[in-house]
Amino acid sequence: MVRLRAQVARVARVDAPVLIWGESGSGKELTAQSIHAQSARAGGPFVPINCGAIPPNLIQSELFGYERGAFTGAARAKAGLIESAHGGTLFLDEIGDLPKDLQANLLRFLQEKTICRLGSTRALRVDVRVIAASHVQLQRAVVAGDFREDLYYRLAVLPVAVPALRERRDDVVTLAEHFFDLYGEERAPRLTGFSNRAVAALLDHDWPGNVRELINRVRRALVMADGRLVTPQDLGLDVPLVLTAALDDIRARTERLALRECLQRSGQNVSRAARDLGVSRTTMYRLLSKHGMQP
Ligand SMILES: Nc1ncnc2c1ncn2[C@@H]1O[C@H](COP(=O)(O)OP(=O)(O)OP(=O)(O)O)[C@@H](O)[C@H]1O
């Protein structure tokens, strides 16, 4: 994730197309938003389109817009999503789902920077930065003949990969605590945090749905929990078989050590120690009280 953030900062400085690859729910759209927000286009619109969610017969008019009378029912002219992203960033999610005829139209747009609304021959100049994303390896779709090779190379000027959550297990608990705080108002009144067994279950799970799955499980736990601590059952997760008291002991000992060291280094300043440990102040106080420690 540190490498990803550095990549985001770097690609934000230029205007070339970006291709983001990552599993479903891993944070592709968030990555695209960060690139936009750090770019010179930040003041312009960020227009996301899920190419897999728009019916194939509508996608042409949605993307490119249409003139009045272009087809039955087109009572008024309408700008397409590409036009509405003028001056900003167009985010094409699930680009692999784009039908082949539209792949050709998109390629033309990327080459010429102009579009023609349906029912019009007038070329409109549109200034848009394109970021595309896919949860499948597009190169394979190219080999299979489902995705145009020329479009692939146009889009993949700056490739960015978002790692799956199971490839960065160290982040799971931090993210879980973040969402615990973020959705705090949905929390059962007596709930204060995650049990050791819940933490072990979070670390043990493979997260096929990535961060989105984590959000859903934490929110479910916030509502379902009826004790003071979230249990694996509240998260809908199995208690890992390998869960031993020894592991809990090691974790507790490591936490105490880290807390003590960071407090010492920060001259007993809780905010600074929390920052050094990469946790919120709330989490810091919760950890201190869990271990019966005082700054
Ligand atoms: N590092 C993170 N910190 C906080 N929230 C995150 C992080 N990564 C992802 N999320 C959240 O997880 C959810 C899923 O992220 P996002 O929509 O960006 O994933 P995606 O890869 O685009 O998903 P899909 O493939 O289904 O379109 C969003 O609510 C997003 O805000």
Image (tube, rainbow, N blue to C red):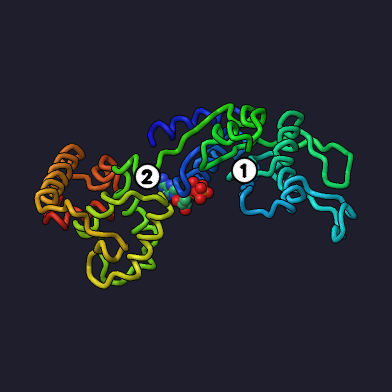
Residue under the image location 48 percent in, 48 percent down: 24
Q: Which mark is residue 165?
A: 2
Question: Rounded to the nearest whole Å, what is the CA distance between mark 1 and mark 2?
Answer: 22 Å
Q: Nearer the viewer, residue 289 or 295?
A: 289
Residue under the image location 36 percent in, 63 percent down: 184
Left or right: 88 as drawn, with respect to 253:
right
Mark 2 or mark 1, which is nearer the start of the sequence? 1
The local secondary structure at tag 1 comes to strand
Q: Which mark is residue 111?
A: none
Q: Residues within 10 Å of mark 2 (few under 14, many from 20)?
A: many
**Image quarter of the N terminus:** top left
Q: Position of residue 15 (x, y in %)?
A: 62, 29
- From the Cβ of disc 1, is ligand 1 less than 8 Å away? no
Up-down: is 6 above or below 292? Answer: above
Residue under the image location 21 percent in, 39 percent down: 266
Q: Residues within 10 Å of mark 1 (few under 14, many from 20)?
A: many
Q: Which mark is residue 92?
A: 1
Left or right: 90 as drawn, with respect to 279:
right
Up-down: is 57 above or below 7? Answer: below
The local secondary structure at tag 2 comes to helix
Q: Position of residue 178 (x, y in %)?
A: 35, 53
Left or right: 130 as drawn, with respect to 174:
right
